Image (cartoon, rainbow, N blue to C red):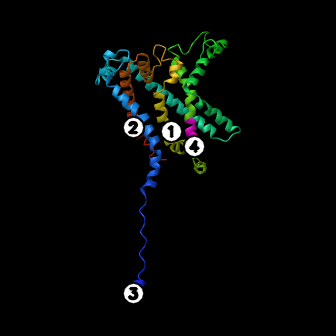
Amino acid sequence: MAQAAAVAKPPAPPRRRRASATPRRLPYLLIAPAALLMLGFIAYPVISVFYYSLQNYNPTKPWRNGFAGFANFTHAFTEDPQFWDTLTFSAKWVVVEVGLQLLFGLALALIVNQTFVGRAVGRALVFSPWAVSGVLTSAIWVLLYNSQTGLTRYLADAGIGSYGTSWLSDTSTVFPAAVAADLWRGVPFFAILILADLQSVSKDLYEAAEVDGASRVRQFLHITLPHLKDAIVLSTLLRAVWEFNNVDLLYTLTGGGPAGETTTLPLYIANTSVDAHNFGYASALTTVAFVILLFCSIVYLRLSKFGGGDK
């Protein structure tokens, strides 16, 4: 009987081998070198800026170098009127540029989203300025604004304005001239992002709206805009940060002039560090700009409810 029971007893299931932890960790091990390099290239400059913002650091005046505490920040907020002037102009520049770029970019995206002959060529022409670098863009517009060979000469030939007029050296025209140059390059960015989101809108929504008698305006307000909400929020936030940090175009186009009329805070920081060699104070201004951008970005994302899914 004992032998029969032993024979009838089913064999024990084979033991499962413990899964090796190495395959699960392998992706992280593979990306670890790149992640460490990126962390080093990002973390080290940020930490260095925070460190030097608390220092008096000027290589041309080493006898004054040393720990300064919050003296650089105090000087910026209470004793440096140029800081407030450049910060005010930076805010004005961001609001005007981002607002106009969004308006024209949305209009262009709606146009090239339609079906017409030569649409592919039209899209290529619309998006091509975005591929041009900031320095090359400003070089092109410097030539266009040249008083001897640029637009002003042809306008003077047509009886509009006078010869020898330079829009970039006149305080009353330098701002709109700089805005126009940056619009040429910035509008395609909005057009690209908005067009990509427009293509995902179901045509059934528009057909149903037409059946209900909704006009084109109502379709745009109640279908198109709600669908584009996240794309608009993301593009305006990214572009606002980039425009706030705009240095290359304004530096090449106007150099911050005339009379400091087009000097943004990042351009003032660049002049303070590179020209004046006052790296401690420039680091403090950079820290202030970082805090301002971080605070405004968080507030903007919360107010806009980005990613909330309300479409």
Tag 4: amino acid:
Leu
In terms of sequence position, does the residue under pointer 2 or pointer 1 come before the other? 1
Residue at 46% from the left image edge and 55% from the top image edge:
23
Numbered mark located on residue 232 in the image = 1
Name the spot of residue 281 as percent of width and height, x first.
Answer: 36, 21
Q: Amino acid at mark 1?
A: Ile
Q: According to the image, label 2 marks what residue?
A: 298
Q: Is residue 164 above or below residue 113?
A: above
Q: Secondary structure at mark 1?
A: helix
Q: Are marks 1 and 3 in contact (CB under 8 Å)?
A: no
Is residue 31 found left or right of 136 in the rendered image? Answer: left
Q: Earlier in the sequence, mark 2 or mark 3?
A: 3
Q: Residues within 10 Å of mark 3 (few under 14, many from 20)?
A: few
Pair 3/4: label in front: 3
Tell me which residue sits at (56%, 31%) in the image. 187
Q: Is residue 63 above or below residue 185?
A: above
At x 41%, y 82%, the residue is 9
* N-term-proximal mark, 3 vs 4: 3
Q: Which mark is residue 3?
A: 3
Residue 201: x %, y % from top left? 57, 47
Marks 3 and 4, Cα distance to the nearest angstrom? 77 Å
- Is 193 within the magenta? yes
Q: Which residue is mark 4?
A: 198
Q: Secondary structure at mark 4?
A: helix
Q: Secondary structure at mark 2?
A: helix
State which region is magenta: 190-198
Instruction: Measure the C-alpha gap from mark 4 to mark 2.
Output: 26 Å
Q: Are marks 1 and 4 in contact (CB under 8 Å)?
A: no
Q: Quadrant of residue 21?
A: bottom left
Mark closer to the chain start, 1 or 3: 3
Q: Disc 4 or disc 2, which is closer to the eye?
A: 2
Q: Amino acid at mark 2?
A: Ile
